[in-house]
Structure formats: C-alpha cells, structure tokens
Image (tube, rainbow, N blue to C red):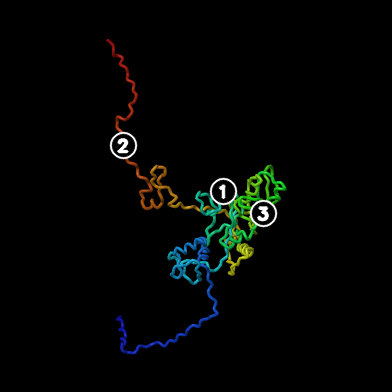
Amino acid sequence: MARPFKTQRDPQATPRRAKTSFTKLAVDENAVAEPTQRLHKLLALAGLGSRRDMEALIASGRVTVNGAPATTGQAVTQFDVVRLDSRILKLPFVAELPQVLIYHKPEGEIVSQDDPEGRASVFDKLPKVKNAKWIAIGRLDMNTSGLLIFTTSGDLANRFMHPRYEVEREYAVRIFGELTDGQMTQLTEGIELDDGPANFDSIKAQGGEGANHWYQVILREGRNREVRRLFEAFQLPVSRLMRVRFGPVNLPPRVKRGTMLKLEQKEVVGLLEWAELPVPSAPLRQLTQREKLKATTVFMPKVRRQRVSALDRPPRDAADGSAKPYRTKSDAARNPAAKKPAPRKNENRRVRQTSDLPVPDVKKKSDGNRGRG
C-alpha cells in the first residue's frame, strides 16, 4: 500500500497559534518550609562512618548536593540529590526506631574495631545492619565479662555513656581476700587514685568460699579499670569481674556467656523514653511470626571471616626465603596451569643402566677332579 502524500503547508500563510492562558501560582507566605538536617549527620546515620569522618569526607570534595560540591555543615532536605562519587545516596530523613543488642561478653575479647595485634573483637560477631552501624555502649576490658549493649542510635549511646548523666553500672566482683568494715566504708567515701579520687556508690558483701569472696558494687563512672584499681588499693587483687547491669538494662539470666539477644520494639521505645529522646512518630512495623520468634530468641553469634588485605600478605618472593609463595584463586582462574604444578625436569639426570643392577652372590661349585695327578 502506497503511503499517502503529506499535505503541504503554505509558508506564507499565517501560523495558527493556540490560545492558551497561564495562571501564575500564588506564593503562600505562611507555607511551612521543608525540614532540613545536617548533611554530615545524615551520612553518619546512613552507616558511612562517624560524624567526624563524614566532615572529612565532605571536605575532600567527594560528596555533591544537586551537582554542586557539598560544604561542611550544609543543610539538606529530602528533595535534594546527594551523591558520593557519582553514586546516589539514600539518606534516612525519616527517623526510624533504632536497634539494640544485648551481648554477654566472655573474657578474651576486646571492645575495639581496630586492633593492630589482631585479637578477637566483639565487633567480629555482630550481625550486619542495613544503612546503619553498631555502636558499643561502654567498654569492658579483655579480662572482664558481662553485659555489653550495642545500638544503632548515637544519641542513645551518648545518653548512657556521657559523664554528666551519671548512669549506674553494677558489677559482681570476686577478690582474693576479704574486706574489713573500715575498708568498705573507705571505698564508699573515696580513695585517691592516679587519675583522681574515686569511690563506689554502694558495696555489699555477697559471701564466698575459702579465700575468695564476692561483692556487689555500683558506681557512676566508666574510667579505665576503675573497679580493679579500687580493690588493688588495699592489696586485694580481683580474680573475677562481671557487669550485670547498665542503667535500666539488666543482663537476663537466659543470655549465657557468648550469646546475644535483640530487644523488642516495645523495649526499645521504653529505653528512648527513659533517655528522654524523641520516639519516632511512625507506627511500629508489624513483624511476621518468624521475626517475632527470632526477636525473642537468644542466639549464638557467628564470627565473620576477615579478608586478608594485600598489605597484610607476605611477599611472594622473599630475598631470605623465609616467606613461602602463595597462590590466590584469581591467579588459578587466570592461569589454569597454576592449579597443578608442572613436574620438575632435570636435564642432568643419569639414565639407569644394566651395570647398575646388583650382582647376585653365587657360590661356584668346586671341581672334584681338579688337582688330581
């Protein structure tokens, strides 16, 4: 079928103009502006790092807002397009209910994310969290066990740890020896330590067997090894130290050593109300039956495998021959021959000959007729 010819328009004809009318929108002077938040705070809430790290990231020029380089302290709204290295970021403008974990820390683990010695860390066992990061509320040294709280809310962690709030910490202490009544009174009144005076708010004897005795102590500070140093002032070494309460959070008896428990949403709301922090206005998310069982079940965390970086690997060819060469999976994929080492060839190898065979020891038979005349 032939295509119809297009109707030719007379160029000298007057063009038809559509009659359209545009009405200007009236500007409402009483309209409420969109709420703004600090960019570095939103980046930290998104789990990209601490607020100080985010300020340095913004100063490096890698973050842009609506195509323009971001500035430190800049305020943004939910309609702004924020990019990190040309990647669009989804920032948490709407406040969400934070997550809280309870962990019964055993001895032998440190509360640090960066350890040059490569010791076991509590952060190696934490489950992954999306668009956030875990913050440890308080610290426990390597030889101290007990309650350790993790949360995704920096404000909640600050409410627990800041010295001006004076949140109570309760410990169960076992010492080698026994305190006198005068020593217990002196521990509550105050003892001068290297970094200033320190004291217990209360101390109670909990009995004991033989030379070991248990005590329950409460204090409102979190200085380094403060409980141990107070007992060591009377030459009484601490053989066991366990934190059993931090503020309103107690260590549940069902949370055994090395296990974790995730607090329910209602319990998290109670913590926010105790800390006098704003509770998100959004309704609580409806959990499935599986999520409800998982939220109230104590679980054993799994240690995540740490990848060895290129800086930590030994050199392939060491001059002294101390480091053995290694082969990675990528090397084997690129070179199939690297999966199986080739047989060694020795050009100077001597071929086995007949003369190399051992000669059997055969006794010759004596001739009886030999020697006769």
Find the distance from the CA under tag 2 to the CA under tag 1. Answer: 56 Å
Placement of 63 over or under 209, stated as above or below: below
Q: 241 left or right of 88?
A: right
Q: Amino acid at mark 3?
A: Ile
Is disc 3 placed on a helix, strand or loop? strand
Q: Quadrant of the N terminus?
A: bottom left
Q: Amino acid at mark 1?
A: Gly
Label 3, on which residue?
218
- Checking the image for residue 108, the label placed there is 1
Find the distance from the CA under tag 3 to the CA under tag 2. Answer: 80 Å
Is disc 1 placed on a helix, strand or loop? loop
At 30% from the left edge and 16% from the top edge, which residue is drawn? 367
At 68% from the left edge and 49% from the top edge, which residue is drawn? 215
Q: Earlier in the sequence, mark 2 or mark 1?
A: 1
Q: Position of residue 138 (x, y in %)?
A: 59, 56
| Extreme residue toward the right, this view | 181
Label 3 packing within 10 angstroms: few (<14), some (14-19), many (20+): many
Q: Quadrant of the C terminus?
A: top left
Label 2, on which residue?
349
